[in-house]
Amino acid sequence: MIIGGDKMYYGFHNHRFKGETTFNFGHDHGYSGNTTYNNDTPGHIHCASGITTYDNEHSHYYYFMTGPEIEVNGGHIHYYEAIAQLSRGHIHYFYGYTSL
């Protein structure tokens, strides 16, 4: 079953996310992925991890937990913010909202 563009399996669902990090030391990085699956209980969150795009001869690992669901258009999204881990002497910040 497809719900708002995300897959739902046995009452569990996940969300997509993507964006750009902050511009630090003359460059930024892209990131994208899917959150972990969770059920639709009130106040639920999701986790995500990954690696940014390879720019300026390096990339960064990241991990984040979303905030609780925000009801929109008959579905919900989640806000997230994170710090991309230290690589080549610097970090990047990023934030955004998941897909419906």
Image (cartoon, rainbow, N blue to C red):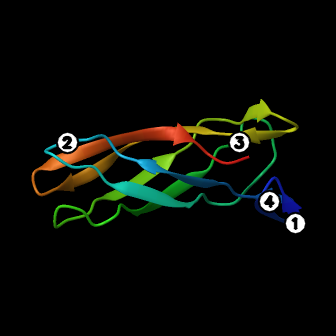
Earlier sequence position, callout 4 versus callout 3 = 4
Amino acid type for the residue under numbered disc 1: Tyr
The one nearer the camera, 41 or 94, is 94
SS label for mark 1 = loop
* CB under 8 Å between discs 1 and 4: yes
Reading the image, the residue beneath label 4 is 12
SS label for mark 4 = strand
Q: Is residue 39 above or below residue 76?
A: below
In the rendered image, residue 61, in percent from the top left (x then y), is placed at: 32, 60
- Number of numbered callouts drawn: 4
Reading the image, the residue beneath label 1 is 10
Amino acid type for the residue under numbered disc 2: Asn
Earlier sequence position, callout 1 versus callout 3 = 1
Q: What residue sits 52% from the left and 56% below the top?
A: 48
In the rendered image, residue 72, in percent from the top left (x then y), is placed at: 79, 33
Reading the image, the residue beneath label 2 is 24
Reading the image, the residue beneath label 3 is 44
Q: Residue furthest left?
A: 89
The label shown at residue 26 is: none
Earlier sequence position, callout 2 versus callout 4 = 4
